[in-house]
Image (cartoon, helix red, strand yellow):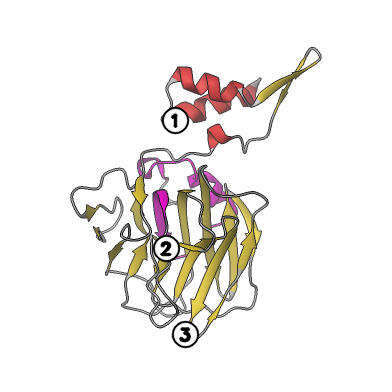
Amino acid sequence: MPYLGYLLAQAVKAGQTVASAITSAASYVTKVGSSVVELSASAEALKSPSNGSAYFVESNGWWAYSGLALSEGQDYTILCWVKGEPDAGHATLVSHASFRFQIRNNIEIRLDVTNGSSTSQPIYTNSSSFTNEWHHIGVKKTGSSIRFFVDGISYGGSTSLSITPRAGTGIRMGADDISGIGSIDGFTGDMSNIAIWSRPLSDNEVASVKNKKYSELTASETKGLISWYALDDISGTTVPDSHGNYNGTAN
């Protein structure tokens, strides 16, 4: 049963004890007659970050840094682990002065893009809720094309949208930073391993980094990496950046 062995190994790697890994992994196999049927690799035991996390509260749980290293029109990839609480509105995960990467209505992944007075929204609607369980989600920009990721799988977005991050402005995690576009949309729940690259990652790269700690990334996977926030090592109001020099400041 090679998959069950892999499931156990990944559950232990994600921080579970051997006993709990066996229990959770066993819940994803079933017997049909005398045969054992192994379920898909999207089992919940695989859906957890490879280290700890930070809890955000919509009203005051965001943090920010000001050293954004994205230039006008630059491509990028944003990935993070998320375990949200029920939210019928917009829950912002990562935002910039010109975009906000969100979960909306518990099932949509959304990228709001603004020029300061209006927005457009590439959206991917997931087949199940993102609430109360871990999911690895992300977005990448390649020219005018947007792709979303859920648990290492790539899904379509817009293929004709112009997205131009504004140079020299900051990023927020857990709340939006778009001025003049409605009220602040915050996130309530846990996040971990928020990572930002200044290039579009390949589908294989996204799948590869999904269950890794920063220390496990290969040299090629750190190419273009701006920041990696494990969010298991916050000290006071300092949110350490494992890769670059962009430590965050907690609100």
Q: Which residue is identified by label 1?
A: 13
Image position, residue 15 (x, y; %) = 41, 30
Q: Secondary structure at mark 3?
A: loop
Residue drawn where x is 50% and y is 45% of the image: 210
Residue 43 against residue 102 in the figure, above or below? above
Residue range of the region highlighted in magenta in the rendering: 188-217
Judge depth for marks 2 and 1 and give the one in front. Answer: 2
Image position, residue 48 (x, y; %) = 48, 39
Residue drawn where x is 63% and y is 62% of the image: 124
Q: Secondary structure at mark 2?
A: strand
Q: CA distance from mark 3 to mark 1?
A: 42 Å
Judge depth for marks 3 and 1 and give the one in front. Answer: 3
Instruction: Return the residue found at the far left.
Output: 236
Q: Nearer the viewer, residue 202 or 59?
A: 59
Left or right of 95? Residue 131 is right
Q: Which mark is residue 249?
A: none
Residue drawn where x is 57% and y is 35% of the image: 44
Q: Residues within 10 Å of mark 1 (few under 14, many from 20)?
A: many
Q: Amino acid at mark 3?
A: Asn
Q: Earlier in the sequence, mark 2 or mark 1?
A: 1
Residue drawn where x is 62% and y is 55% of the image: 154
Q: CA distance from mark 2 to mark 1?
A: 26 Å
Q: Amino acid at mark 1?
A: Lys
Q: Which residue is identified by label 3?
A: 115
| 208 drawn magenta | yes
Q: Which mark is residue 94?
A: 2
- Position of the N terminus by quadrant: top right
